[in-house]
Image (cartoon, helix red, strand yellow):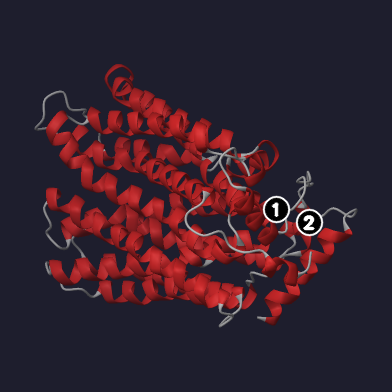
Amino acid sequence: MSVQDVCEVKKPSGLGNRHLQTIMWFLAMVLGYGIRNNMSMAIVVMTDPTLENSFDWNMQTQSVVLSSFFWGYIVLQIPAGELSARIGGKILIIFAMTTNAIMSILTPFSAYYGGWQLVCACRVICGLSQGFLLPSIYTLVGKWAPIEEKSRIGAVINSGSQLGTALQMLMSGFIADAWGWPAIFFVNGITGIAFVLIYSVVGADSPRKSKFISDEERLYIETSLKQIGKPKKLKTPWKAMWTSVPFISLIFVHCAQNWGYWTLMTETPSYMNQMLNVNIKANGIMSALPYLTVYILSFPFGYFADYIINKKILSVTATRKLSNSIGLYGPAIALIALSYAPPGNVTIGVLLITVVVGLNVGRLTGLMLVHLDMSPNFAGTLMGITNMSANIISIIAPLVAGLILRDETNASEWRKVFYIASAIYFIGNTQFLIFGTSVRQPWNDPSEDSETDDTAEKGQEKSDKAV
């Protein structure tokens, strides 16, 4: 199908089923990241020696409990991408959220009757099952998001991680005060079960499999993505992927992004407490502020990226690199400024932390969408590979920070942590500007028996390069 034919299909007016799917994926991210981060807030109350029936877990034990989620999370990333491409992403999202909900509900009982070891087991299982979430969502986005709306849909979905993190930080303290710390896990679990029940009815693996989509919207999506006709089973081009310089560049920039992000995620509460003298109750609210900022900014960033691409102001590749530069260079500069923030100055400290995390919104319309640009057919597998690599970094970065921070009240030691994160941000994005691309890759469609698809793909590449 030619580019001219694509342009002749009119966009349906109003909200459609693709928007419903987007909302459900967004909610899955909100709930998934809420469950991922609930232990970070709950463990403060669980180990408070001033409370009755608290747990005598030292800092080493607490660190093991907090990191145990990621032991499981990194394991199934690549298999999840492959499996979602073969059996569909819907069933895997349902499995992931059901398992997370059940494990969340069981966590308080595990703590009381099995100690920290059984809590770790619950967290590992949460991580294992949640490993299916992001690759499955990306597989579905590759089948549901029209090219003209990809940036805004991707930004909305990925912003769910920020809102989930922020809401968990904001609500956990109030929930624990009102009903006790076990209620944190019960609320997450019950909400997760409610999501599964709804998504089981309205979710679909593709427009062609949806019972609620109009023919007009289905044609619009399939024409935009050049997926008209019965979808083909494609063999994953492993060799072509692993020898692709743009894809290797994408892995590196995703790892660089996670180093900075998880350094801040794990160390911000301590920094606020030790350097800014912010009390624990206000800590949760102030720690959530940067992530709420990212969530709010994700909407204008998504629409702006689509506007630039649709108006042909910049190519898709240039737009992604511009967004990603804001998302990584911006925080790199702000981190250096943060390292020189006056100790005890809450206003300047919180403002700079908000800027660091807030500017990171650029990655949502930058590197996070390049997987879909390069290869919509294998977006889930690509995300599984880069996310696994990046989450190994998520484990390493806080450990490095812990080795440096011998004295958390020493500004010079915090400066070293922030300088390292800033340098990694800078190096990661610079290599992405040199080697990265959003041009559809030749290995996106490895089948040799479809001249129509090959011709359409070449047409898309020429169109992208022309822009």
Asked if residue 155 is positioned above or below residue 141 in the image, the reply reads below
**Can residue 52 be seen?**
yes
Looking at the picture, which amino acid does disc 1 mark? Asn
Helix, strand or loop under label 1: helix
Q: Residue at x 58, y 33 (%)?
A: 91
Q: Which mark is residue 445?
A: 2
For the residues labelled 1 and 2, the Cα–Cα distance comes to: 7 Å
Asked whether 250 or 342 is in front, the reply is: 250
Q: Quadrant of residue 321?
A: bottom right
Q: Amino acid at mark 2?
A: Asp
Q: Position of residue 149 (x, y in %)?
A: 54, 63
The residue positioned 19% from the left and 57% from the top of the image is: 286
Q: Which quadrant does the C terminus fall into?
A: bottom right
**Position in image of residue 404 (x %, y %):** 33, 59
First along the sequence among labels 1 and 2: 1
Where is residue 204? Give x, y as percent. 58, 39
Depth check: 413 or 458 in front? Answer: 458
Q: Residues within 10 Å of mark 1 (few under 14, many from 20)?
A: many
Disc 1 target residue: 377
- Asked if the residue at tag 2 contacts the one at tag 1, i.e. Cβ–Cβ closer than 8 Å, the answer is yes
What SS does tag 2 mark?
Answer: loop
Give the side of residue 97 with respect to residue 210, left or right.
left
Disc 2 residue crowd, few under 14, some 14–19, many 20+, Cα 10 Å:
many
